[in-house]
């Protein structure tokens, strides 16, 4: 299928109406910028009967802040996020990641909510219907075998959103609205390690906003800096083969705070384990090399892209080393 099927379109102007319209639709999907969902519908991967368009909901369209936190509406575009001055001041990596998503036209209509709820990706899945049919489909859709890890029943399709690992650095929480009301949870809890079912959202649940607490002196006594970088095949417009976010603080040459977020190398974005052990270490060349090796070991990329997994693991470590060096 490479054409758009007929679908009913709803255009609510409040979160509550959006949830109600989704609940009333037999097989609906939330639609934001459509830069992921519409591609998948055209390829026959997604087959909704109706779409609930969320970009006309004022509550989801703004970025607000107070002394304690910045709140980013789920329908804020990536261009708007990348140009927000307070976000850039406090959360540089978030700004950089938003500015690295796809190309400029995608960032004009692609949203934060869509980026965080993006489907996972794999070379055996993000293909046309005729390609997948000719190759016996796969576990994630219609098939009974995983072509990446045959014999198992797990899907390793990679989460490849750029923004999520940067938000994880700062303990972001997400505000969710659904048929049972509203709730908040850590962004990390939005994801599970399953390429076929990587979001923990219940049916009809909508990501209304992201809250990021502003860093305080209680977290670190040194100025905290962050950065994001990714490796991709087409430099001007492409998903990350590996995306790395680093948050680091250094006082008197010693590391006082270190976190590394990863995307593109697993079914979920995550913070690399074991970074605490570098706190208190002198941030010299050998320390940065150890950080590189630790990140590489934690990046469990599988053969879900045309680029070999071992390259993506190496590049994840190298990017972490490079970013940490740039922060010093
Ligand atoms: C050529 C190309 C290159 C790309 N490169 C990149 C890249 O480099 N990095 C990257 O991160 N992405 C990339 N993308 C994917 C996409 O453009 C972005 O991730 C974008 O941010 C998706 O947002 P959207 O608003 O368009 O999402 P949509 O397509 O509207 O939605 C995506 C998914 O999220 C769900 N959704 C949307 N909003 C919400 C919400 N508020 N609550 C709950 N569910 C919601 C939808 O139902 C759908 O399942 C690329 C896409 C293309 C076509
Ligand atoms: S990892 Fe396996 S099951 Fe998942 S999309 Fe790829 S081939 Fe399909």
Image: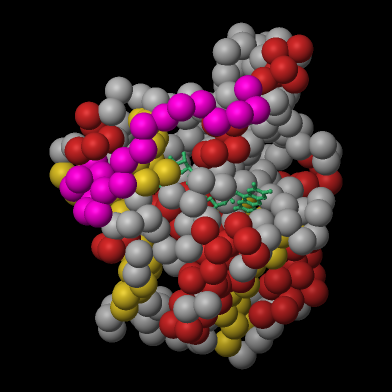
Examine the image and state in which quarter residue 209 appears.
bottom left
Residue at point 42%, 29% (across, down) = 7
Placement of the C terminus among the 4 image quadrants? bottom right
Residue at point 70%, 25% (across, down) = 128
Examine the image and state in which quarter residue 236 appears.
bottom right
User: Where in the figure is residue 138, as x and y percent of width and height?
Assistant: 65, 16
Q: Nearer the viewer, residue 198 or 239?
A: 239
User: Where in the figure is residue 66, as x and y percent of width and height?
Assistant: 27, 81
Residue 166 appears in the rendering? no
User: Where in the figure is residue 261, as x and y percent of width and height?
Assistant: 58, 58
Residue at point 23%, 41% (across, down) = 19
Which region is colored magenta?
1-19
User: Where in the figure is residue 257, as x and y percent of width and height?
Assistant: 53, 73
Residue at point 68%, 40% (across, down) = 300
Residue 174 as seen in the image, left or right of residue 243 = left
Verify whether residue 15 appears in magenta: yes
């Amino acid at each position: 299928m490479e054409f758009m099927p007929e679908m009913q379109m709803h255009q609510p102007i409040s979160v509550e109406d959006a949830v109600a319209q989704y609940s009333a639709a037999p097989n609906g999907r939330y639609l934001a910028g459509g830069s992921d969902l519409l591609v998948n519908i055209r390829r026959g991967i997604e087959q909704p009967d109706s779409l609930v368009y969320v970009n006309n909901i004022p509550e989801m369209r703004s970025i607000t802040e107070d002394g304690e936190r910045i709140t980013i509406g789920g329908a804020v575009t990536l261009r708007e996020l990348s140009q927000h001055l307070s976000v850039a001041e406090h959360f540089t990596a978030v700004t950089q990641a938003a500015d690295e998503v796809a190309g400029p036209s995608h960032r004009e209509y692609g949203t934060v909510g869509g980026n965080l709820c993006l489907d996972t990706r794999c070379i055996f899945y993000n293909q046309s219907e005729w390609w997948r049919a000719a190759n016996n489909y796969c576990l994630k859709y219609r098939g009974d075998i995983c072509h990446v890890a045959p014999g198992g029943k797990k899907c390793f399709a990679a989460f490849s959103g750029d923004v999520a690992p940067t938000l994880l650095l700062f303990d972001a929480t997400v505000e969710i609205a659904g048929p049972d009301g509203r709730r908040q949870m850590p962004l990390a809890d939005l994801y599970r390690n399953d390429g076929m079912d990587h979001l923990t959202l219940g049916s009809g649940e909508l990501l209304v906003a992201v809250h990021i607490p502003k860093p305080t002196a209680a977290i670190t006594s040194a100025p905290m800096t962050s950065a994001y970088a990714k490796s991709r095949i087409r430099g001007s417009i492409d998903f990350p083969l590996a995306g790395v976010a680093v948050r680091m603080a250094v006082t008197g040459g010693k590391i006082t705070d270190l976190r590394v977020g990863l995307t593109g190398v697993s079914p979920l974005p995550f913070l690399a384990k074991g970074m605490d052990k570098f706190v208190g270490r002198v941030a010299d060349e050998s320390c940065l090399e150890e950080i590189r090796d630790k990140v590489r070991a934690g990046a469990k990329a599988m053969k879900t892209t045309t680029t070999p997994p071992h390259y993506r693991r190496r590049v994840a470590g190298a990017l972490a080393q490079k970013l940490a060096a740039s922060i010093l």
